Image (tube, rainbow, N blue to C red):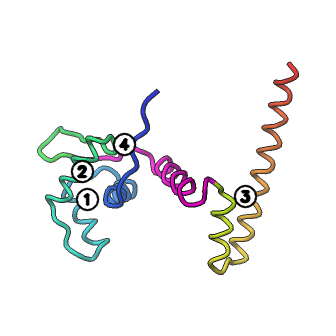
Amino acid sequence: MSKAPPKPTDSELEILHVLWQHGPATVRAVNDELGQRRQAEVGYTTTLKLLQLMLDKGLVRRDDEGRSHVYRAAVREQDTQNLLLDKFVAATFGGSALKLVMQALGNRQTSADELAQLRRLLNDIEIQNSSTSTTDDDHDRA
C-alpha cells in the first residue's frame, strides 16, 4: 500500500489549484497564473523551487521530455480536500463533523437553497447508512 502524500503547504496548495484547473503546465505558465491570481509579481525561481520540492514530496509529476519541463498534479483534488478537511476537523473540532457543521451554519446566513441541498445530502446519507447496515446484518447472519 502506497504512503499518502504529505499535507501541502498553502503555497503548494495554490500551485496545485493552478494544475487542477488548467492541467499540466510549465513553470512559466504556473508562475504567470499565480501572478494573475495574486495580482502581484511572483518570482519565477520561487515557483520553480516550490515545484521541485513538490516533486520530491510526490505532490506533482514532471515530464522531462522536451526543452521545458511540464508539471502535473500527482494528487487528486478530491483526495487532497479530504486529507485537509480530516486534519482540520480533527485538530479544530476534536474530530466532530457535527461541531464543524454547527459552527459553519451558525456563523453565516444560510439560503433556502443551501438548506434544501443539506436536507437532500442528509437524506442520501441516511439511505446509504441504512442500506449499509442491512448489508452488514445479512453478512453477520451468514
User: Viewed as shown, does residue 124 lie left or right of 7?
Assistant: right
Callout 4: SS = loop
The main secondary structure of the magenta stretch is helix
Mark 3, residue position: 121
- In-image side of 2 versus 35 (left or right): right
Of callouts 1 and 2, the N-terminal one: 1
Q: Disc 1 residue type?
A: Val
103 up-or-down from 18: above or below: below
C-alpha gap between disc 3 and disc 1: 36 Å
Which image quadrant for residue 40?
bottom left
| Viewer-closest of 123 and 24 | 123
Say which amino acid is labelled 3.
Leu
Instruction: Identify the residue under disc 2.
Output: 51
Number of residues whose C-alpha sits closer than 10 Å to that of mark 2, classed few (under 14), some (14–19) or many (20 or more): many
Which span is picked out in magenta? 70-95
Give the mark, 4 or 3, whose residue is nearer the N terminus: 4
Name the disc covering residue 108, or none.
none
Q: Are marks 2 and 4 in contact (CB under 8 Å)?
A: no
Residue 74 is marked as 4
Of all residues, the one furthest to the left in this rendering is 67
Residue type highlighted by circle 2:
Leu
Query: Which class describes the residues within 10 Å of circle 1: few (<14), some (14-19), or many (20+)?
Result: many
Q: Earlier in the sequence, mark 3 or mark 1?
A: 1
- Report if residue 74 lies within the magenta region: yes
Q: Which mark is residue 30?
A: 1
Q: Position of residue 113 (x, y in %)?
A: 70, 73
Instruction: Look at the numbered discs 1 and 2 and tell me whether their residues touch, using CB distance below 8 Å.
Output: yes
Tell me the SS state at disc 3. helix
Q: How many marks?
A: 4
